[in-house]
């Protein structure tokens, strides 16, 4: 095999590796975007819950059923967020505190919430492959709005 064929083969290999890494970055970015969307939706549901509670207190009417529906939706959204955060952590981008469960940046030495040391935990993180990524876009898991 000539030098030209060797260079061409090496170039193809490099392009394949770069393409794979770029795909992983895109997948992680999608997960981070999904997490941000979930956080926003959870915040909106908390606001709705606050408005329902205020209405209940000012009108004297009972809105327990509505509050329970919103609370159930918040719980469901938090479970989705937890699974997205777990996938981000498995990618090596985040480290989960073993004490309080907060996700911290990969390079963090201490937990941002409880102050626990994270260094030993970050070394043992398992990494996910691009095949493990689940599409959490709105179309794939959005339920009907509760209110």
Image: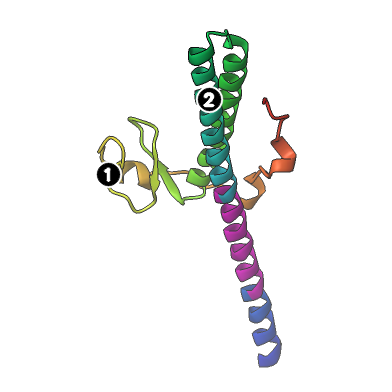
In this rendering, the answer to whether 64 lies above or below 130 is above
Q: Nearer the viewer, residue 85 or 77?
A: 77
Q: Residue 11 at x, y = what percent?
A: 65, 80
Q: Residue 5 at x, y = what percent?
A: 71, 87
Is tag 1's residue or tag 2's residue first in the polypeptide sequence? 2
Q: Nearer the viewer, residue 63 or 31?
A: 63
Q: Nearer the viewer, residue 72 or 18?
A: 72
Q: Residue 51 at x, y = what percent?
A: 53, 25
Q: Which mark is residue 110?
A: 1
Kind of element beneath mark 2: helix
In the rendered view, how is the structure colored? rainbow
Name which residue lies at 36% across and 32% down. Answer: 98
Q: Kindly identify which residue carries mark 2.
A: 51
Residue reaching furthest bottom? 3
Kind of element beneath mark 1: loop
Q: Which mark is residue 55?
A: none
Q: Quadrant of the C terminus?
A: top right
Residue 25 quadrant: bottom right
Which of the two discs, 1 and 2, sits closer to the camera?
Answer: 2
Magenta extent = 15-32
Measure how far apart labels 1 and 2 are at the Cα level: 37 Å
- Give left or right: position of 32 versus 143: left
In this rendering, the answer to whether 111 lies above or below 75 is below
Residue 2: in sight, yes or no? no
């Amino acid at each position: 095999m000539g030098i030209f064929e060797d260079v061409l083969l090496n170039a193809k290999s490099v392009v394949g590796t770069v393409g794979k890494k770029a795909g992983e970055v895109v997948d992680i970015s999608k997960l981070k975007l999904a997490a941000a969307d979930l956080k926003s939706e959870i915040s909106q549901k908390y606001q709705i819950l606050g408005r329902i509670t205020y209405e209940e207190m000012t009108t004297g009417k009972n809105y327990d059923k509505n509050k329970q529906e919103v609370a159930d939706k918040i719980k469901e959204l938090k479970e989705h967020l937890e699974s997205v955060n777990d996938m981000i952590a498995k990618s090596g981008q985040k480290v989960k505190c073993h004490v309080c469960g907060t996700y911290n940046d990969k390079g963090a030495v201490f937990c941002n919430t409880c102050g626990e040391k994270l260094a030993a935990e970050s070394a043992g993180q398992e990494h996910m492959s691009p095949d493990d990524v689940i599409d959490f876009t709105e179309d794939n898991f959005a339920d009907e709005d509760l209110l």
